[in-house]
Amino acid sequence: MPAIAQAPEATIDIAQAVPLVYEQVPFLPLENQYLTRSGDPFTESTLLSRMMRYHTSVRRRIPYFRLDWKLTLADYLGVNDRIYAETYPNANILQENPMEGDVEVVRQLSRSQRDALVEAIVLTLNPLAQQAGSTTSPALWPSTPTPAGEPASRPTPPASTPREPRPGDAQLLLP
């Protein structure tokens, strides 16, 4: 777990983020059919809101990074950390603990659907992720003329990216 000094200062508003993510992943069910202990419907408790609370409050993972979200999905798939029913979000206010149903829904998602879910969450919670992803994609690098001896079809990376080594480059290190 990162030190407190390493954690980003901004906090997320789960209630605001959930509808934005659901717009991007329409295949993800709401799973909001649960009733409170008093018998009232509690439609604000969705699969995604519980997953985000599990990620940030129970597991205390940072919400801005893909790897952390993949770890959370691995928890739901039963291949990383165990999810405990007694600490699962909304378990103490709903008649039925939604953990088992949520785990089953995540297990039924395909790998590409899980990847799309992680991507939607990260891009919604961390707008800088979209900028970072676009600058490292080789398909977006502009093509420039290449020196003789290199393939002409290979794009040239931006100036900030080091070029691949060529024969004789080690000689440049000599005094």
Image (cartoon, rainbow, N blue to C red):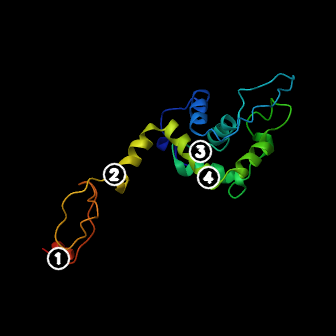
Of the pair 155 and 98, the residue shown nearer to us? 155
| Residue 150 on image: x %, y % | 23, 71
Residue denoted by label 2: 140
- Please state if 148 lies on the left or on the right of 69 as rendered: left
For the residue marked with disc 4, what is the amino acid?
A: Leu
- Kindly identify the residue that appears in the image at 72 percent across and 30 percent down: 45
Residue denoted by label 1: 171
Foreground: disc 1 or disc 2: 2
Question: Of marks 1 and 3, which one's residue comes earlier in the chain?
Answer: 3
| Residue 20 on image: x %, y % | 56, 32
Foreground: disc 4 or disc 3: 3
Foreground: disc 4 or disc 2: 2
Counting other residues with Cα less than 10 Å from the Cα at mark 2, is it few (<14), some (14-19), or many (20 or more)? few
| Residue 27 on image: x %, y % | 65, 41
For the residue marked with disc 2, what is the amino acid?
A: Leu
- Kindly identify the residue that appears in the image at 79 percent across and 39 percent down: 98
- Kindly identify the residue that appears in the image at 80 percent across and 32 percent down: 92
Residue denoted by label 4: 71
Give me the C-alpha separation between circle 1 and circle 2. 32 Å
Instruction: Please say if 71 is above or below 146.
Output: above
Residue denoted by label 3: 117
Residue occupying the far left of the picture: 175
**Which secondary structure, mark 1?**
helix
**Which secondary structure, mark 3?**
helix
Question: Of marks 1 and 4, which one's residue comes earlier in the chain?
Answer: 4
Question: Of marks 4 and 3, which one's residue comes earlier in the chain?
Answer: 4
Any part of residue 27 in sight: yes
